[in-house]
Each structure stands twice: as C-alpha cells, then as structure tokens.
Image (cartoon, rainbow, N blue to C red):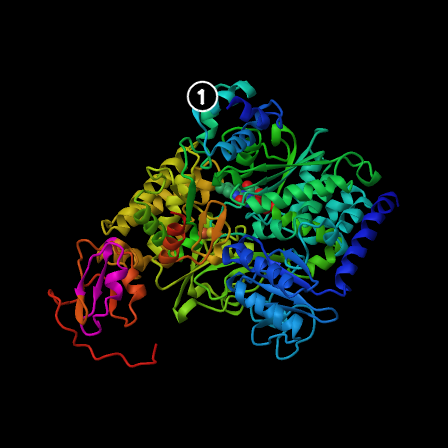
Amino acid sequence: MAQELEAIFQKHKRERSSLISVLQEVQYKLGYLSPEAIAEIARFLKISESEIYGVATFYAQFRFTRPGEHEIKVCLGTACHVRGGERILEEMERELDIQAGGVTPDYKFSLEKVACFGSCALAPVMVVGKEVHGRMDPNRAKKIIRALR
Amino acid sequence: MKAEEAFAPLKQRALAEWQGLQESSRPLILVGTATCGQAAGAQAVLEAVREATGRLGLEADIMEVGCIGLCYIEPLLDIVKPGRPRISYSNMTPKLAAQVIEDYLVRDNPRPDLALAIVDGEAMDGIPRLFDLPMLKPQVRIVLRNCGYIDPKNIYHYIARGGYSGFLRALSMPPKEVIDEMKKSGLRGRGGAGFPTGQKWEFCRNALGDEKYIICNADEGDPGAFMNRSLLEGDPHSVLEGMLIGAYAIGASEGYIYCRAEYPLAVDRITLAIHQMEECGLLGDDILGSGLSFRLKLRQGAGAFVCGEETALMASVEGRRGMPRPKPPFPANSGLWAKPTNINNVETWGNTSIILQKGADWYASFGVPGNTGTKTFSLVGKVVRTGLIEVPLGLTLRQIIYDVGGGIVGGKAFKAVQTGGPSGGCLPASLLDRPVNYETLAAAGSIMGSGGMVTADEDTCMVDLARFFLSFTYRESCGKCPPCRVGTRQMLHILERITRGQGEAQDLDHLQEIGQTMIQGSLCALGGTAPNPVLTTLRYFRDEYEAHILERRCPAAACKELTQYYILADKCQGCLICLRACPVQCIRGDKRLVHIIDQERCTKCSTCLQVCPFDAVARVSGKAIEVPSETIPVTAPPPRRGGG
Ligand SMILES: Cc1cc2nc3c(=O)[nH]c(=O)nc-3n(C[C@H](O)[C@H](O)[C@H](O)COP(=O)(O)O)c2cc1C
Ligand code: FES
C-alpha cells in the first residue's frame, strides 16, 4: 500500500491544502479510504489521523468502506425527483436487495443516491461506474443491472 | 504593441486551422458528446459514425463538440458537406446515424425527413434554420457562443473565433479602465446574488496586500442545474480567458477553479485547457511579454453543497472542513489564506471575456437596464423541451416555459416553477407573466439563483416538493450555526409528518416561525434561504398544506401514505400486464379475471398505473373506490382497436 500511495504523494506538496486532493486521488485509486490509507496520508502530510477523519467525514464524496465492483448511483436531484427518480432507486433496492448506501454481500454492486449529475434535462438519471444513463425507467434500469450480473 | 505581436503567431495558426476546417474538401461530421449527450447515448452514435465512414471508405473529419442545449432530442449529429450548410439531425441512434451518413454522403440525399435544422445557412429542402426553431428563436447566445460549434479540446478553435482578443484588449488598457468597462457593462454576478461584478473587482483591487487571488466558483451544487457544467465542457477557454482578464484588472497572481467532482468531463476539459494555455504562453510568468504573471490551479469539490458558499469554498481549498464563516471581513479583504480574494461564478467569467472583446456598450444593449445581458437557465422538470437555454434578461416566465420550453409534457396542467434551487422558491401560474430578473424573483419570494428552473405539473405535490428541498438542506447544513442546523431539522420533521398525513393545525404557524428565525439568525445564506421553498409554497399553495392536514388528502395524489391504487372493475381487461409488472407481486387475478391490488402489500410504486394499456388503474387520495373483493370475470367491453 505504501508504495501505491507514494506515487500519489509525489505529485503533491507536503502541505495542508493538499489534503483534499490527496484524499480524492487515494479514493480514486483504492475505491475507498481504508484506515491504513488514512494512516499513510497522516504520515505524509504530518496531520493527525483524527483531523483527517474530521475533514474527510465532512464531505459526502469520501467513503470508508469497500465499494462494490460496480458502483450504482441514482440521482435524486430536483429534476430527477420531479421525474420519478425515487422509483428508479426503489427498483434498484429491490433488484439488488440492498438499501441505498449498501453493498451486495459478494461486493459486486454498491448502491448510492446522489443529488444531481448535471444531466437533469435527461432525468431521471442513473450512473453505473463512469457511464451516465439518462431517460431511465425502472425496467431499463433493471436491464442495465442484469446485464452486469 | 508587444502582447499583440506575441499573440500573432497563435492567431495565425488558429485561423489557418479553422479555415482549413471550413474550406476542407472533406465532409465534417460533428457529434455532441457533452455529459448530457452521453447520457442520451452519444458515445454509441460516435462509434457508429466511425464505423460507417470506415465501412463506406469515406474521408471525413469527425469532431466532438459540446452541448448546443437541445438536450431533449439528443443525441445530435451534424454533417457539413463541402460547400453546403451544416445540417443537424436529432434523436440519433447508431443505426439512424449510419443511415444518414450513407444517404447524405454517398447518395447525396440529405434526408429532410430526419433532419432537425440547418445550423448556419438558409432553410433548404424544407429543413428550417436552427434559430427559427421555437426553442431557439427567443434565445441570444453570448456566453454559450461557442458551445456546439467548436472542439472544446482545441484552444485554436477558440482563438479563431475571437478568443483571447478580450484579454489582449484588456492588456491595452490600464487595469482601472478594465474595471470601469466591467461596471459599464452592468454585468451582475451569475452565481445567484447578482452583485455587480465590476464593483466587486474594485474592492479587491483596492484591498491592501501584494498577493491576491481570484477564484472561479464551479461548484454548481443546485440539484437540477447544469449551466456551468455545459459551459465548461463546451467552451472552457471562454471562462479561463475571463479569469486572465480578472487577474490583470485586480492584480492577482494566482487563480483557483473549484469544480465539483460530480463533473468528471468538465474537470478533464479544464485540466486540458490550463495545460494548453501554459503551452501557448497564456499562463505563467510575463504572459505575452505584458509583465503579468498568473497561474491557474484546479481543485475538485468533494460533494458538499455548502462549499458553493464563498467562505466555505475557500476553507475547502485550504484543505479544511468546508464551513462558512461570518462576513465581514469580506473575501475582497480577507479570503484565501487571509489574502484579498475575488470570487466569481463560471458564467460571470464566461461573460467577462466577451465583454472585453466586444465592449461594455454592446453587452449592455441586451437585456434591460439594471439587468443587462443574458442569463443561461437549465430548463428541466415537466417541460416538453428540456435543455440549456440562454435568453436576454427580462423575458417573462411564460415566454421561457411555453415559448422556449414548449409547455408541459403530456398536455398536463402547469403547477409551479422552481427557481434558484434549494435557496429559491416555487412560483405559481399567477406569476407566469412576471419578467425574469433579480428583483422580481426576489419580490415573489424566490431568487434568480444560478439558473436552475424546474417546472412541476399537476402530479407534483407542493408539500412534498418543499419536504424534498428541506431534506436536502437538512443533509447539507454544515452544522456550525444552530438556526440552520436545528431549523432545517425541525422544518423537515414537520413536513414529513404532514406528507404522512399526521399534520397538526398549528404546524403551518410553526413552519412560518421557524423560517423567520432561520432567515434572521443563520450564519450564511444556506440557512438564510433554506426556508424559501417552504415559505413560498405556504404563500402560494396553502390549500395543498391544508388538504394534507385537515382532510388527510394529497391533492396531487403523490404522497404515498395518503394515496391508494385501485384497479377499476369496469375497465380491467384481465390482461395480466400489471400483474406481471408489479415488482412486489401484490396483484391478484388471472386471464379475463378482474385484477385486484392487495392494499396491505402495495408499495405505491405506480408501476401498474404506468403499464396498464386500458387506463384501468386509478390513483386516488382521500377517498376509497369500490372494487370487487374477489377476482370476478371481466365485464368491461373490449377496448376499441387502433385507439392506442
Ligand atoms: C449555500 C450556498 C451555495 C452556493 N453555491 C454556489 C455555486 O454553486 N456556484 C456559485 O457560483 N455560487 C454559489 N453561491 C454563491 C457564492 O457564495 C458567491 O456569491 C458567488 O460565487 C459569487 O459569484 P458571482 O458574483 O459571480 O455571482 C452559493 C452560496 C450559498 C450560500
Ligand atoms: S437532478 Fe438528476 S441529474 Fe440533475
């Protein structure tokens, strides 16, 4: 792990203002912020672990548990709310048998709700990994998931 | 002039490249691949275009462009045949795209039946001009001038269309005159509050300190708004040029762009654009020999709405929790690392570059006095033509929603338009003829905001919409000041009770009181404006609150706890469609037997209502419908064929 993170650390100045960027890059790399990763970051930036948790837990982007192989994000922003985003989320919860915020026992899928991806004109919107899917309906959403099983 | 001389080679190269593209003997194919286009399937269309040109042995240039704003009919594909105008095709699928390419480029049939419009030329073959389409006719493209026209990954396209000439002009003026020019243009900050931009710059220019910063606020946290995303994806340099001009006028040596992480494509585009500016000598030391030294850095937000607030944003850039602090001191005097800092929204910066290029008087000729220029809006929700629009300030809500947006989907009744997101309000039909500007929207209890415009129809419950916004602000409140932390919690709690049918008579007074306290006592505008969705719905849609509380009824039949679904015995055909579609298998029945919903187990997901081809599912609130208790044979007359 230390080596993996070293490559990230080298791109940043050893200063407080690098903290959030470092956390982001570590999360992009590992999928989440593990306790070991936080310890490494604390060592690199010379900031206490508890302070790093203080910052990281403030921001919705950071997660502290392992995500699924496919990260499913359902938008519940205003446009998607008005156009039935909740129905997509409910369908996903049923299909994957987990609640929003959860991960399937085999770590194949995790499910999250997000407030807006900026594709509001194509609401309701769902994001699978890096792919944005617009004009969703519960059935289409289900098909996308089933194709990944 | 020195800077102009230094810029000349860049301009020359840009013009050569652009002209080459315009006068090429090869056809040019454009695909809109902004995030919205991709969400509609543009990537597959792009691949089909590549496949088709390869298969047909066509020598064609393929260019990815940003969003032209017609998101509701994306994916868009445009073809320019040498010597012909650019034709735009909408609602493309990979198959259709391949067909159009073959028909037009091989058989010379432009397929008027599939074409949407002629982008830059006269109508032909019955295909209308783009700006004669109802959605575009009232629009004026100033800030979105290049979106959909240039390759946003190519700085030379931007330069060829006049890019960075505003910066050159600024360099030829003393900084103070640049600020005067901004003042004269009348531009007001597009981030929401509408503070005059030139004046803001002057505060920062006059602030004591030799190290100053400027910031571009690209946090765009308002859910339902995507103006900033579109601009950054479609024309990043227009924003960055604005920042260069600001740096020169204010005397800043470093700039930050704070872009939300939910916009990965915008982040990529900014990163590339900064890199290109560095390569072209438009960033760094002694830019174009002018003596100006300026650097730009990109920071990504991390999913906190409050970080759009300027002091919270700065705390976040410094690597801390994004919590606002009291003002004064204002950022102009004490901002990033306590140094004088000027922060503007993406769209404000995007306007800056064109104002300097074309002059303040030109800019002020659009819009109305006091509200000059244009404003972009993300027109979403239940309107027919959803997308990104840019209109002169002063148009009425009705013109925007009906003329540009095409009215409400499915011929339903308009109920409300929500402007300004979680800080804004919901305005009813009676206010549709108000002109849109900073003052009228504020007087109506809403705000202009950054440009989110979400339309709701008769199926939207206004109490539920207020609850939705409060659940958002409750989650996003940073927790620093009690009025906001406790107030959002309490308001949400009351609204949840009302939407569950457990409201009490005094709830409405309590909501009003809590709202007033939050407005007066909150540390920042998040808490200070969070009551707006509640207060405006109380003001304009009080009857809906009363129906929930006094009659335990949701007039829109949207609140689940107050709504039931029934299958009407006199319409059901016993076709099994809803029975099979029900995700929780709570529908009983059989072929040619009337179906029955088990009310106990129904989750009210409305799937049956959506799939029933015979309108046999009713959604009601506040009354029960008599339905058979057993699955009796179908008695309804068979539906007439062909009627749909
Ligand atoms: C809770 C909250 C969220 C905000 N979010 C944004 C935002 O996403 N983008 C933005 O430009 N301004 C946002 N603002 C306004 C900024 O504080 C600031 O006024 C603005 O960036 C100034 O730019 P302008 O003068 O160009 O409008 C927000 C304010 C508050 C209180
Ligand atoms: S509200 Fe869902 S993408 Fe914006």
User: In which chain is the residue bearing label 1?
Assistant: A
- Residue A93 visible in the picture: yes
Q: Is residue B72 above or below residue A9?
A: below
Specify whether residue B637 is painted magenta: no
Helix, strand or loop for disc 1: helix
Q: From the Cβ of disc 1, is ligand 1 less than 8 Å away?
A: no
The C terminus of chain B: image quadrant: bottom left
| For residue A97, side relative to residue A114 (left or right) | left
The N terminus of chain B: image quadrant: top right
Give percent across and percent down for residue B119.
65, 68
Give percent across and percent down for residue B446.
47, 53
- To which residue does mark 1 refer? A50
| For residue B609, side relative to residue A108 (left or right) | left
Tell which of B206 and A82 is nearer to you: A82
Tell which of B228 and B55 is nearer to you: B55
To which quarter of the image does residue A102 belong? top left
Specify whether residue B571 is painted magenta: yes
Span of residues in magenta? B561-589
Residue type at mark 1: give it: Ser
Q: What count of labels does the image hold?
A: 1
- Residue B517 visible in the picture: no
